[in-house]
Image: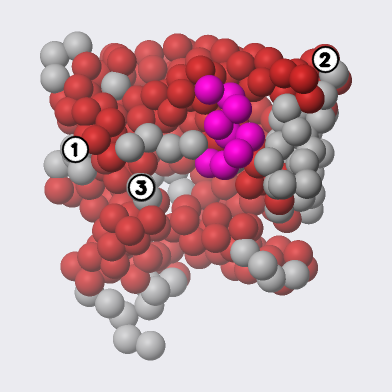
Amino acid sequence: MSTPTVVEAYRECERITREQARNFAWGIRLLPGPKRAALSAVYAVARRIDDIGDGTLPAEHKVKLLAEARAAATAPHEHTSDPVYAALDDAARHFPIPLDAFGELVDGCEMDVRGRHYETLDDLVEYCRCVAGSIGRLSLGVFDPPLRADQRRRASELADALGVALQLTNILRDVREDLGNERIYLPAADLRLFGCEIKARPDGDLDPQGGALAELIRFEAARAHGWYDRGLDLLDLLDRRSGACCAAMAGIYRELLTRISARPAAIMRGRESLPTKQKVQVALRALGPGGRRHG
């Protein structure tokens, strides 16, 4: 297989991002060219890892492929015949991207493959940090703000928290779909607290159980809002364009979380999403004065 040029490699990653990122693409567009290309490479690799975990192959085959993906993502210079890893390798040469964080993403996908059970919030947060906090820290490497060592540590913690917020939003959005894939992420302790369970009715919709499930969803949404409140302090440590990118991505997900909290019955029937017009508005606000904090 011939080695792609750097231009070809980035073009492929940007195609993947444009076609599959949906919510993330709005924020990535706000970055200057080199950072936009680098973050597209990060996304394309992460997407490849996620697709292995979410695919239909037998579990043992998934584990093997995830091990191969871990090796390639953490040492992309050894896999430059693949355009996705060629782009990541180039990006890592220009930005301090913490490639080891891809290993944490693989850890989270392995939890899915092995059918991990989440008893407590702490258990779930561990998973969220693996699959989404890792992406926050990888993105921070691309943003590369000029910070002191202590500020950089704080920025990494805040990027991790913002990743947790986004993943909790994903979990609430996809609760019905995940049940169909025999995955339940909401902590068992919380289900017991509200006296309900995640189960489907004969028509395929989730059983509201007399309103108990809606109350649980609102409870979990309030928790996720708390993670946004903390994680969005990251914006104060970023340059304007990186901050706008981060604010747009987080803002779209936070708007989605607000919709879920206001209409929990909607996610019992299917996946909730924001209309494109509203995503554009969030992205534009992120560029304006004072818009970074609120998306």
Q: Nearer the viewer, residue 186 or 239?
A: 186
72 within the magenta span: no
Q: Do we see residue 214 in this rendering? A: yes
- Judge from the rendering whether residue 4 lies leftward or rightward of residue 271; answer left or right: left
Q: Nearer the viewer, residue 19 or 231?
A: 19
Residue bearing the label numbered 3: 22
Mark 2 vs mark 3, CA separation in Å: 35 Å
- The amino acid on which the numbered mark 3 sits, given as a three-letter code, is Arg
Q: Secondary structure at mark 3?
A: loop
The image position of residue 70, as x and y in percent, is: 57, 59
Residue 139's disc is: none
How many marks the image carries: the answer is 3
Q: Secondary structure at mark 2?
A: helix
Give the quarter of the image for residue 295: top left
Q: Residue at x 19, y 11 (%)?
A: 290
- The amino acid on which the numbered mark 1 sits, given as a three-letter code, is Leu
Task: Give the quarter of the figure containing the N terminus.
Answer: bottom left
The magenta-colored residue range is 263-271
Residue bearing the label numbered 1: 30
Q: Is residue 156 above or below residue 173?
A: above
Q: Residue at x 37, y 35 (%)?
A: 274
Which sits earlier in the primary sequence, circle 1 or circle 3?
A: 3
The image position of residue 146, as x and y in percent, is: 24, 25
Mark 2 vs mark 1, CA separation in Å: 42 Å
Residue bearing the label numbered 2: 193
Secondary structure character of the magenta stretch overall: helix
